[in-house]
Amino acid sequence: MEELYSVGIDIGTSTTQLVIARLVLENRAAPFAVPRVAIAEREIQYRSGIHFTPLLSDTVIDAEGVRAIVAEEYQTSGFAKEQIGTGAVIITGETARKENAREVLRALSAFAGDFVVATAGPSLESILAARGAGADEYSKERHCQVLHFDIGGGTSNLALYDSGTLVSTGCLDVGGRLIKVDPAGRVTYVSPKLRQGAAGPVPRVGETVTPADLAPVIDTMVAALEQAAGLRPGTDRLDAFTTAGTHWLPAAAPVVSFSGGVADCIGAPQGDWRTYGDVGVLLGRAIRDSAAFRSAELHQGRETIRATVVGAGSHATDLSGSTIFYRDIPFPLQNLPILKLTEAEERGDAGTMAGAIRDKLRWFADESGLTQTALALRGEKNPGYARIQEVAEGLCRGLAPLRAAGFFPVVAVESDMAKALGQALAARLPGPLLCLDGVGVDNGDYIDIGAPLAGGAVLPIVIKTLVFNGP
């Protein structure tokens, strides 16, 4: 067994948090068999305090403020940054749309260890929150469908699991900090996203409001969540609040679960609704009082406000192993876009494959030329020597423009043929080369690949979608 430490940093619309987890790697193959290394244990070692995300304005994150929070939490945790081997920095919700999101990631680079992912995609956020809350395990154990809502300050991320398998993800512009208020109940901020989606009157900045004044807006947001869960007829509110660039169809799952800061307000006792300087308390109460949600089975997740950061710290990393091949790779590799062939293109001869690859490489060219990409294949079970040689030849010819631009082949294969394919490619190509196995990806995904673990037998990987949201 081998162990490593993983960090999760979540810079959200409302809060910034950090966790450090211990991951135990174990070879589960029989003696003398091909190694199959898996993550056998995940244990949270440190949970930070919950800090309000520092902002310089409605559109600019306080990068130095975020860096100071992370530095303080590292010191408090007792872990040195050199001890961290993997993990994820997740900029989520409306924070991902701030003007200087990338600047924040650069400010955190000193704490990133050798391999930390920087991403803000709603699909990845949905998955991490659901796994951090345990919705995937509950679905697997009960052999049922579970629809998980992670409701934060700016967005609600949705993940549908069926018997432990992820079916779909989505994102709605529904959150507790779409309206901010001061202690007197005076409105200090209203999100433009809310003005686009709300059916009723939206308060203006400077107005002093009461829960009754905000009820129409809150009810509209809850209606969008109800329609997303298939608990309310129609899709008008759902369509109005769906985050740009994402898609969600109503999913009538028998079990619904919640996480995020608003989840803590669903079952919270009565108190001052202005406690957090936003409408999160009112949104949580409205969900609690929703007749539609009361008609479903509600599952209380093991994490609420910390679900995403726990998922980032302990569930973001998977492993590629058993038949990998790599040579002279400058690890870590980050944000490589995926180019995936169709099944017909992949099953063709060397000429067919080469032509398809060259055609699709144009997707990743701009005025400055091509960029480093990762080629994805389904692979074949038990391919013969001649077929492996044919595939290698097709890849060599197809990837020639990429190599001419100064990049090296990165090939991700679903089946376990990466080592043999890598050896065939190595005989044809000089320089850096990487072939991964057990990696299921699609066009539109991105992949991050870390430095080798377990004596070089496996590589940590993170698959993600939408590295940054648009404005």
Image: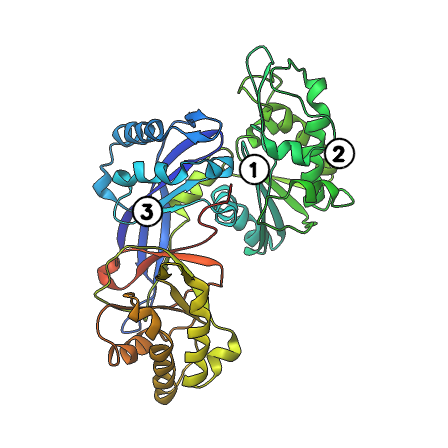
Query: How much space separates mark 2 and mark 1, taking CA atoms?
Result: 22 Å
Which is nearer the eye, 20 or 96? 96
Q: Residue 383: where, in percent of width, then height?
A: 40, 83
Q: How many marks?
A: 3
Residue 144's label in the rendered image is none
Say which of marks 2 and 3 sits in front: 3
Q: Quadrant of residue 228?
A: top right
Residue at left offset 54%, top offset 17%: 275
Does 198 sit above or below residue 454?
Answer: above
Does 234 sit above or below residue 37?
Answer: above
Q: Residue 366: where, in percent of width, then height?
A: 41, 59
Q: Which residue is mark 3?
A: 116
Residue 291's label in the rendered image is 2
Which is nearer the eye, 271 or 347? 347
Q: Residue 445: where, in percent of width, then height?
A: 46, 58
Query: How much space separates mark 2 and mark 3, taking CA atoms?
Result: 43 Å
Indicate which disc, 3 or 1, sits on the residue closer to the N terminus.
Answer: 3
Q: Which residue is mark 1?
A: 155
Helix or strand or loop: what does disc 2 sit on?
Answer: helix
Q: Residue 195: where, in percent of width, then height?
A: 65, 31
Task: Inspect the image, locate mark 1, and give the three-letter code of the amino acid beneath it.
Answer: Thr
Name the quadrant of the N terminus: bottom left
